[in-house]
Amino acid sequence: MIEWFMWLQLGVATLAGLLCIALGLAGRKPNDLTMGATALVELLLIMQLVGAIVAPLTGNNATGSLLEFYTYLISAILVPVAAAAWALIERSRWSTVILGVAGLGVAVMVYRMWQIWTVQGL
Amino acid sequence: MTAQESNAAGTTAGTTRPTPVTGIGRVLIAVYGLLALAATGRSFVQIVSKFAEAPLSYSLSALAAVVYIVATVALIRSGGRWRRVAWITIGFELAGVLVVGTLSLLDPALFPHDSVWSLYGRGYLFIPLVLPVLGMWWLSRSGKARA
């Protein structure tokens, strides 16, 4: 994992999460802004996947369990997709809140992935 | 069911209970889904890579993961028989987190490796402890609304 990219991703996922929860609680249905923020979170996860595959070739190896790392990464990739699918099926303010929950969930998982990559034995 | 409910709420808006309880229930289901995913992923890793180290903890993790998945499905369907399934699985979760959490505090040697429920779900921000309570609250609220 590349450190600055991880922090960027963590920041984007957290902001997207807070934004969607705030707008959802304010009564907004899923719109281009909240769906776009979720799509951005997903895009960064896909880039992270490519990065994680390429990084060991450049000598940037994971110190922890790769199996655990990829389980987190694949799970994280599924989360925004599931939330967005929900938002498309049910167009209510609560779907926007759920987009936010997904964003915050991804943020936690990204941080955990960083721990697995860098801190041996956690 | 969902469409009927929101139609009913729409036509009687202002006079009866507002929809937020059902709405927040949706968020609850989403969080349940997330926890089910986390527990499944974790127990998958534990069982594949180091099952022999702590068979009891890791079997519990797997069992907990399955129960979370069933609870998520039961909350989504949430009618008739599924309501009972939701009560049973959520009750099982609460019992699990309380029993395993207490045992892991009293006798750490019993659960040397983390399970979802060790130390009352500390590894998961105590969500496993809070969620069943919220789930039961929601089940009883929505039960009253329907009866």
Image (cartoon, coloured by chain):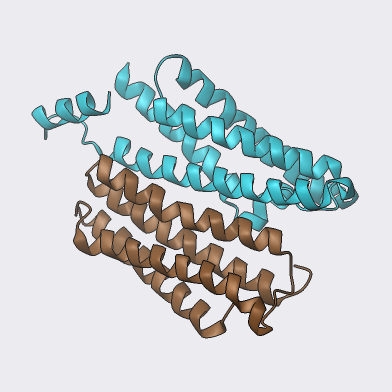
Residue at 45 percent of width and 34 percent of height: B137
Residue A62 lies, in percent from the top left, at 70, 74
Viewer-side residue, B126 vs A4: A4
Give the side of residue B102 with respect to residue A44, left or right: right
Give the side of residue B5 with respect to residue B56, left or right: left
Per the rendering, the colour in which chain A appears is brown
Residue B110 seen anywhere in this rendered image of the structure: no
Give the side of residue B127 with respect to residue B112, left or right: left
Give the mark count. Answer: 0
Residue at 52 percent of width and 77 percent of height: A6
Residue B8 lies, in percent from the top left, at 16, 25
Identify the residue at the far front of this view.
A57
Residue B76 lies, in percent from the top left, at 41, 31
Residue B72 seen anywhere in this rendered image of the structure: yes
* Quadrant of the rendering where the N terminus of chain B is positioned: top left
Per the rendering, the colour in which chain B appears is cyan
Residue at 47 percent of width and 40 percent of height: B134
Quarter of the image for residue B13 reads top left
Residue B131 lies, in percent from the top left, at 52, 43
Identify the residue at the far left of this view.
B11
Residue at 45 percent of width and 74 percent of height: A9
